[in-house]
Image (cartoon, rainbow, N blue to C red):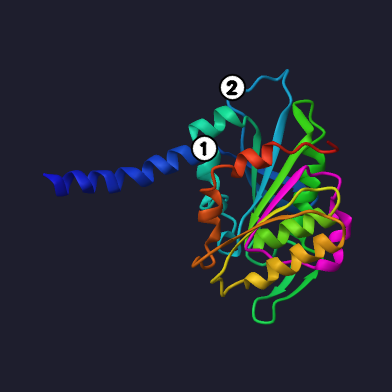
Amino acid sequence: MMKNYSRIILIFFPFLLFSQTELFEKKNFVVENDTLRYRILAPLDYDENEKYPVHLFLHGSGERGNDNESQLFHGSKQFLDKNNRKKYKSWVIFPQSPNNDWWGGHYDPYKFDYNIKKSEALGLVIKLMDEFVQREDVDNDKVYVTGLSMGGMGTYAILTLRPDMFAAATPICGDGDPSSVSNFAKKVPVWIFHGSLDKTVLPEQSLKMANGIIKAGGNPRITFYENVEHNSWDTAFAEKDFLKWIHSKTKNK
């Protein structure tokens, strides 16, 4: 009987998770011949007369594609948590990069050579965000960005390209160009996360970015996790003050 009960739980749990992610509405953002697929979660108890924060989430390379589903695999759970939805009412946007693109440009994981080149996907994300933050129900002083792995790289890239848009950023196991951080170092609070045993994106890359921000006059917060490999996002999302810290930040204040 216990074995059968366990099987029921295992079968039911993925269905429950799927039904929750369906709260993220499927959308397409079209610019001429280009399409950005994304999912969006509306604030709990939405009121058109209120203004809400916006949280942009950039996924990792493993979630690229065109199904408009995979990008929710990591990170969406914390935004769907009932307590978080009540406490941090906000718009949450999960765009999806196609397989042939990379947030922020080219990245060679063997040479750890990062260059901000033209990324069509990130360009579409920027256009989407430029348009979205103009809405009457958006609090322009509370726009945030989180990204993991490739998305961590995209976080640094979008901060460089839109330094006046964001009130806080949380790049997780990312990398970037430290020579470009002067655009946002003094403007945007950044909390950096990395696993000390990461062999996919070396932890030195986050140290490099933190040092670059400090040299440019910024004051980054940085957290390294002992004995954690590339999936440091799991530990970062488990931080009790992860969302609290983010939502405590207001642009220009």
Query: Label 1 sits on what residue type?
Result: Leu
Q: Is residue 195 left or right of residue 49?
A: left
**Does 77 appear above or below 210?**
above
Quadrant where the C terminus is found in the figure: top right
Local packing at callout 2 (Cα closer than 10 Å; few below 14, some 14-19, many 20+) is: few
Q: Secondary structure at mark 2?
A: loop
Q: Secondary structure at mark 1?
A: helix
Q: Quadrant of residue 60?
A: bottom right
Residue drawn at the location 56% of the way across and 64% of the way down: 62
Q: Which mark is residue 216?
A: none
Q: Which mark is residue 80?
A: 1
The answer to whether any part of residue 72 appears in the image is yes
Q: Is residue 35 left or right of residue 196?
A: right
The answer to whether any part of residue 117 appears in the image is no
Q: Is residue 74 left or right of residue 95?
A: left
| Sequence-earlier tag: 2 or 1 | 2
Quadrant where the N terminus is found in the figure: top left
- Which residues, given as a range, are shown in magenta? 161-184
**Does 149 appear above or below 25?**
below
